[in-house]
């Protein structure tokens, strides 16, 4: 493994920053303390800072020793989750009900370490923009930064992202060309019937039975309408109806999520959901209203950028520590919005199995969105080295 020496020397210092962020987590668009910490660190290293994109976003710009007209973006996310942390170690969350359970504190730390190295050495050509993004966890912070002019204010040829991945060995990376994470979409189906006494259901129109039929029929979209070679998930995660044992309610509600790797498949699923909900409800005397919200598009890596990143990774950790192609995830990531605007690649860096956690960690596994999760600080020099080498090599390509 080839790690950059100055970054190794800074590991403990950057880890303390990471643990400070972990102890003071902030939810989407509330990352004021984190943004202040990031901006102050960048400024102290001589990096000009722009604040306020996407409300709490921070962008630092680092110029190399020569300007070859090329620019690259490196992105980390900063927000935490609305979860209660079960860990009791010294850097556990001090904010009840808020926790860094997805490693965004570590992502911020890795990019800070890379920015510090690039600013101190500037042994590269062109320009590096370090992007610290708010509100990744379901609130479209990437899109908010783009809408506020991210790529207009900071022109760049490509943009890259990275996420820690529990279960993957420390010292390893995973990536693939094309889709690596799914789209995220939510739906609600309201079924309107007619209330009645539970002992006299013939006097009403039962939306509960209609909800049961709709729920069963929706699964036929996945098994009979979707191309079986095109992955997709349709999960009904909530059913709400009624308030008393002896009352047929007036309405019922189904809620859930749809995940796909392609827009065409998502279009098909939404169309069929609307048909099934409306026609099944009508057959049972009810009316259906489908609300379908497309939240995050699929995260799709550019083929050329993925190949480039793979070469950089193999030069750092060796070919045996690169999982390619990695099995994609049906989880979602709003870095997808940036990849819709610019070519680039999103990679996973192994976070291990949780053995790194100090005494006082919770009893659960060290998995994402788990109350006993903690980022592995051993990743800081490796992730920062990857960022540095990626930027230097990408920018050294001919214009």
Image (spheres, grey):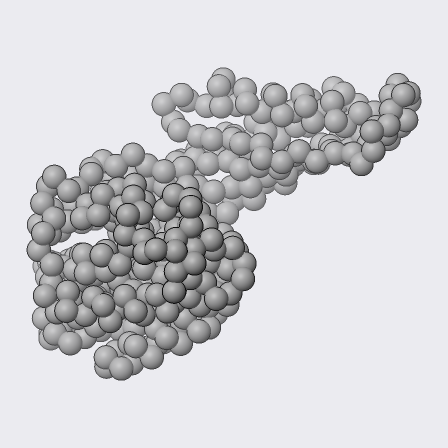
User: Residue 215: x, y in percent?
Assistant: 62, 25
**Could you tell me which residue is drawn at 90 percent across and 21 percent down?**
199
* Position above or below: 20 against 326: below
Q: Tag count in the figure? A: 0
Residue 354: x, y in percent?
A: 31, 47
Q: Residue at x 8, y 55 (%)?
A: 2
* The C terminus, quarter of image: bottom left
Position of residue 121 relative to residue 268, above or below, is below
Left or right of 255 in this view: 242: right
Q: Quadrant of residue 20?
A: bottom left
Residue drawn at x 72%, y 24% as measured from the top left: 210
Residue 148 location, quadrant: bottom left
44 w.r.t. 285: above or below = below
Observer able to see residue 385 = yes
Q: Is residue 394 left or right of residue 85?
A: left
Residue at image position (22%, 56%) is: 378
One can see residue 52 in this view: no
């Amino acid at each position: 493994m080839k790690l950059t020496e100055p970054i190794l020397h800074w590991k403990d210092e950057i880890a303390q920053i990471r643990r400070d962020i972990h102890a003071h987590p902030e939810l989407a668009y509330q990352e004021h303390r984190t943004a202040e910490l990031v901006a102050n660190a960048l400024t102290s290293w001589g990096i000009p800072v722009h604040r306020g994109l996407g409300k709490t976003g921070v962008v630092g710009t680092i110029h190399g020793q020569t300007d070859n007209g090329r620019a690259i973006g490196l992105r980390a996310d900063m927000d935490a989750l609305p979860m209660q942390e079960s860990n009791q170690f010294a850097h556990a969350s001090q904010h009840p009900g808020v926790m860094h359970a997805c490693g965004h504190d570590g992502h911020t730390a890795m990019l800070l370490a890379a920015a510090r190295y690039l600013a101190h050495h500037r042994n590269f050509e062109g320009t590096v923009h370090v992007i610290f993004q708010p509100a990744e966890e379901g609130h479209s912070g990437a899109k908010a930064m783009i809408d506020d002019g991210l790529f207009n204010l900071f022109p760049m040829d490509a943009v890259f992202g990275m996420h820690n991945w529990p279960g993957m060995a420390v010292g390893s990376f995973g990536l693939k060309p094309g889709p690596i994470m799914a789209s995220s979409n939510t739906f609600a189906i309201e079924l309107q019937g007619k209330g009645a006494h539970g002992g006299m259901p013939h006097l009403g129109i039962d939306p509960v039975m209609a909800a049961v039929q709709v729920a069963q029929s929706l699964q036929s979209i996945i098994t009979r309408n979707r191309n079986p070679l095109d992955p997709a998930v349709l999960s009904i995660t909530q059913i709400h109806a009624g308030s008393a044992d002896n009352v047929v309610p007036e309405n019922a509600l189904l809620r859930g999520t749809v995940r796909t790797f392609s827009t065409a498949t998502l279009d098909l699923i939404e169309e069929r959901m609307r048909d099934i909900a409306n026609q099944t409800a009508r057959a049972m005397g009810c009316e259906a209203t489908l609300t379908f919200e497309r939240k995050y598009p699929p995260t799709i890596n550019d083929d050329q950028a993925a190949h480039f990143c793979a070469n950089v990774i193999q030069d750092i950790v060796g070919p045996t520590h690169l999982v390619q192609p990695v099995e994609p995830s049906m989880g979602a990531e709003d870095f997808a919005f940036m990849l819709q605007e610019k070519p680039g690649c999103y990679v996973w860096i192994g976070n291990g199995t949780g053995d790194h956690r100090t005494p006082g960690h919770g009893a659960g596994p060290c998995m994402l969105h788990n109350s006993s999760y903690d980022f592995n600080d051993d990743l800081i020099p490796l992730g920062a080295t990857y960022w540095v080498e990626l930027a230097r090599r990408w920018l050294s390509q001919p214009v």
